[in-house]
Amino acid sequence: MGTEAKNDVRADLSFWFGLSYSSFAVLPRALMEAMPADWQSRMALLLNEYSEAFPNQPDIGTRVQATRGNKLAKFPEWVLNYRHPDRAAISALRR
């Protein structure tokens, strides 16, 4: 890891969880697949490395629920429909 990464707080995984009590990081597939191919390849390598490091995961599932203002909400269609992404909605989220 280069010096830049060591000094960059964003390279610290704990930074992404902040002061929250979150136990999971959840990323929408539609947005991940909208990232450049190089990013997707690196992410896939990291996920494979994670799976190889912990091959004996407990046989339990997880569920993600959308909320808005601490109340349950429906996910926008563009989040769920990763097979036919709404490129305009995704582009609106970019910088």
Image (tube, rainbow, N blue to C red):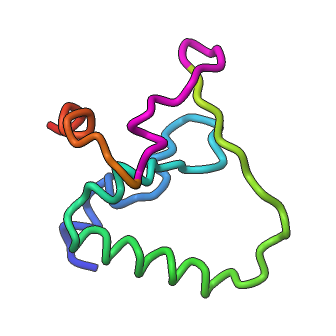
Displayed quadrant of residue 59: bottom right
Displayed quadrant of residue 69: top right
Quadrant location, the N terminus: bottom left
Would residue 67 appear left or right of 45 to someone viewing this image?
right
User: Which residue lies most toward the right here?
Assistant: 59
Quadrant location, the C terminus: top left
User: Which residue lies most toward the front here?
Assistant: 84
| Image coordinates for residue 5, horizontal then vertical, percent | 25, 67
Q: Residue at (53%, 48%) from the top-left corner?
A: 26
| Image coordinates for residue 50, horizontal then vertical, percent | 56, 77
Residues rendered magenta in the picture: 68-82
Please name whichever residue, 40 or 14, is drawn nearer the observer in this view of the structure. Answer: 40
Q: Residue at (26%, 68%) from the top-left corner?
A: 39
Magenta span contains residue 5? no
| Image coordinates for residue 53, horizontal then vertical, percent | 62, 84
Magenta span contains residue 81? yes
Displayed quadrant of residue 7: bottom left
Would residue 15 appear left or right of 49 to someone viewing this image?
left
Please name whichever residue, 66 or 78, is drawn nearer the observer in this view of the structure. Answer: 78
Determine whether 56 is above or below 6 in the image. Answer: below
| Image coordinates for residue 81, horizontal then vertical, percent | 44, 45
Q: Residue at (64%, 14%) from the top-left corner?
A: 71
Determine whether 15 is above or below 54 in the image. Answer: above
Q: Residue at (62%, 41%) from the top-left corner?
A: 22
Q: How many marks?
A: 0
